[in-house]
Image (cartoon, grey):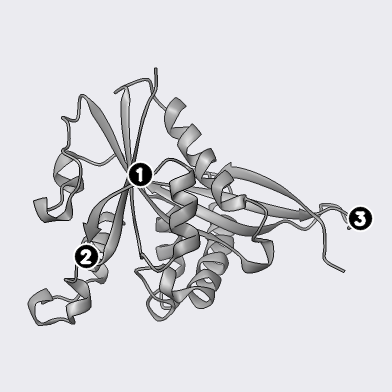
Amino acid sequence: MKLQNEYSFFKVSKTENVLEAAEKYRDLRLRALKTSPSSFSSTYEIEAAFSESDWIDRLTVPDREVFICAATPVHINTTPPPVEWIGQVTLRGPMSMADFALPAESGQTELKSDAEEERWQMLSLFTLPEHRGNGLGGKLCQVAVDYLRTWQSSPNQIYIRLMVKPENHVTVNLYRRLGFATVGKCTLAEALRANGDGHLLPKDLELASAKYSQRSGLLMSFFMHRN
């Protein structure tokens, strides 16, 4: 019999219960990389080697906000009830024009000044397979978007961008339902830098595998206004 769960959504605190949160985030992230390796620009082998401080940094660096979906079984009478982190999405930003910029051939929408536009990269959306089919990925993204509407009052326009592999049809369609539009294509190197993982790139890109320079990933964007 399949367990019934109640689902909750929240932004991970950068100051409270950080070590416990980092352990739960690590377990979910590594499981995601093992379960759906084709969905991510990083790999299980790379991140399994991360230290405890690396995982803490992932949650506490100023330019990242991590949002979690947690599952609590309905009919288990324990105190406190068991809570499992089963989904997550991350926002990186706000990013400067220089950090957000891409070559013209990417097709990215023309950027406005920092005073006119706030820019964020959405990344690492994942839910565990046994919890899929409940609309949790869309709800996670919506929680993240709602956070951006209220975390500060200006600038009025918010530009949210993401990069996704085109073969991930379910994820691409989810983003489209949320209002994201495909505007161009990106390379793996651009995706790693945009996601804050530029340090994972080979030292000499010109000698590296062609997979880093092929413009094959979908570039999707979403604009919204605070007022």
Q: Where is residue 70 in the image (x, y as percent from the top left)?
A: 66, 53
> Which numbered mark, 2 or 1, is in the foreground of this view?
2
Tag 3 or tag 1, which sits nearer the N-term?
A: 1
Residue at (68, 45) in percent of width and height: 8
* Dot 1 amino acid type: Pro
Q: According to the image, label 2 marks what residue?
A: 187
Question: Looking at the image, can residue 68 be seen?
Answer: yes
Q: Nearer the viewer, residue 109 or 124?
A: 109
* Dot 3 amino acid type: Asn
In the image: residue 109, left or right of residue 103: right
Checking the image for residue 62, the label placed there is: 1
In the image: residue 178, left or right of residue 103: right
Residue at (40, 46) in percent of width and height: 91
Residue at (68, 61) in percent of width and height: 131
Q: Which secondary structure lies at badge 2? A: loop
Q: Position of residue 215 (x, y in %)?
A: 20, 66
Q: Which of 142 and 169 is in front in this view?
A: 169
Checking the image for residue 77, the label placed there is: 3
Q: Where is residue 77 in the image (x, y as percent from the top left)?
A: 91, 55
Q: Where is residue 69 in the image (x, y as percent from the top left)?
A: 61, 51
- Callout 3–callout 2 Cβ contact below 8 Å: no
Q: In which quarter of the image is the N terminus?
A: bottom right
Q: Which secondary structure lies at badge 1? A: loop
Residue at (46, 26) in percent of width and height: 150
Q: How crowded is mark 1: few (under 14 residues within 10 Å), some or many (20 or more)?
A: few
- Callout 2–callout 1 Cβ contact below 8 Å: no
